[in-house]
Amino acid sequence: MHKITADWVCPVSSEPLENAVVITDNTGKILAIESRDKHDPASLETYRGILVPGFVNTHCHLELSHMKGKVDTGTGLIPFITGVVTQRNSNAEFIAEAIEKAEQEMLKGGIVALGDISNAPDTFSIKSKGRMRYHTFLELFDFLQDAGAEKTFSDGLAVYQQLELAAGSTRSFVPHAPYSVSKSLFERMNEFNPKAGATISIHNQETPPEEALFLKKEGAFLDFYGKFGISLESFEATGRSSIYYALAHMNPANRSIFVHNTLTSRTDIKAAQAWSQNTFWATCPNANLYIENRLPEYSVFLDTQARVTIGTDSLTSNWQLSILEEMKTIALYQSYVPFNALLRWATLNGAEALGFEDTLGSLEVGKTPGIVLIQGVSPDWKLQREASARRVV
Ligand SMILES: [Zn+2]
């Protein structure tokens, strides 16, 4: 049994508690949360700081961990994708080592669950060990070529079938992005995935050329596709932002995580919320700064009660894989976002987005959420730049 206390306990599902004790069994299952004065101080593990639930990272590409530092910062999404496509091949041992190291980094920083994009089986042996709860997004794209959808899907299925799920882990087929997935491929994935309750993600509204493609069939994506010899002859502009193409072809009965959203407007959020009650908005601020040097406007997400979650994206587009560092970036650039909102985005919202809230996301009796100690939050609840986080249970 563990009896842990700190200056504050933030259950996330309820108000912060001063001088409270979290009692767990040896598996980390929470048995009770009680007041400190009920306990002999000598029986307690006592910390300075704040105890919070383990972090949930809703967007990563673990399989790209070996490309850390390989692609330049600040060039925009299209040069970034070109860099990934042309440089991702490497030797299998190097890739596997980088993945293992990346998982260790996340565990150490208090991450207990991961929504992870896979195009290939490189991460599957790590995932089968069950050191975190994983939702694997088997991600497909056919560069808007309806004729290629069936072959893309059957190749993807061969990868999907190699994944052995550890207890508590899940998987689904997901579209990469509106600009890379044909209607036929959306349909093929919808047919295969559960008809309700599955977790789906899609990269969304990340770069101005994505909007130009859908609004007017103009801009840098045409050159990008041309360079790879792909014809967009059959593609027609919808005259609306890219998210509406996604909404038209995704299943509102599933949970949908829209990822990045740097260009998403209040109107877009409301349209998605009207489309489904199960929309989530994964923000990866450090990756946004790395790739496009811009951030989403978080005030519109707060105003619309959007359920925001936090992702690290991959080591190809980030300097580290740390949810605390993502929270710090938001606190630095848009400091009006309250600490309690950041904490909810980093924990319970993420658990709900991945369908893992039965065990994770909040300090509640019966859950095994992991307990993380955050140090470096000021008395007025501002996350300081020197703040740190580590797993204590
Ligand atoms: Zn991504």
Image (tube, rainbow, N blue to C red):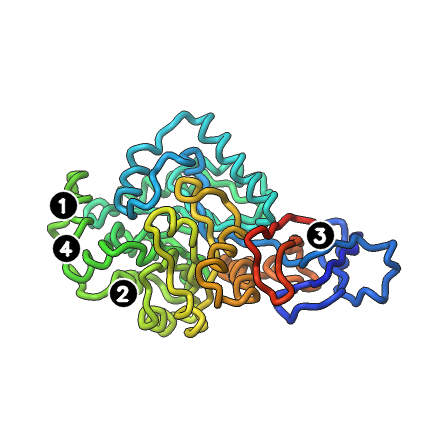
| Front position in the image: 194 or 310 | 310
Tag 1 or tag 4, which sits nearer the N-term?
Answer: 4
Who's the residue at 32% across and 55% down the image?
206
Which amino acid lies under the numbered mark 2 shown in the image of this protein? Tyr
Please tell me whether mark 2 sits on a helix, a strand or a loop: helix
Tag 1 or tag 2, which sits nearer the N-term?
Answer: 1
| Disc 4 from disc 3: Cα separation | 54 Å
* Residues packed near mark 1 inside 10 Å, few (<14), some (14 to 19) or many (20 plus): some
Disc 1 designates what residue? Answer: 231
Please tell me whether mark 4 sits on a helix, a strand or a loop: loop
* Residues packed near mark 2 inside 10 Å, few (<14), some (14 to 19) or many (20 plus): some
Task: Answer left or right for 28 relative to 246.
Answer: right
Tag 3 or tag 4, which sits nearer the N-term?
Answer: 3
Please tell me whether mark 3 sits on a helix, a strand or a loop: loop
Disc 2 designates what residue? Answer: 244
| Disc 4 from disc 1: Cα separation | 14 Å
| Disc 4 from disc 2: Cα separation | 17 Å
Which amino acid lies under the numbered mark 3 shown in the image of this protein? Gly
Disc 3 designates what residue? Answer: 28
Q: Pinpoint residue 303: horizontal percent, then vertical percent.
A: 43, 74
| 225 shown above or below 2 | above
| Disc 2 from disc 3: Cα separation | 43 Å
Please tell me whether mark 1 sits on a helix, a strand or a loop: loop
* Residues packed near mark 3 inside 10 Å, few (<14), some (14 to 19) or many (20 plus): some
Who's the residue at 72% across and 55% down the image?
48
Q: Pinpoint residue 390: horizontal percent, then vertical percent.
A: 64, 48
Q: Give the label, 4 or 1, closer to the camera.
A: 4
Q: Pinpoint residue 61: horizontal percent, then vertical percent.
A: 43, 44
Number of marks drawn: 4
Q: Which mark is residue 218?
A: 4
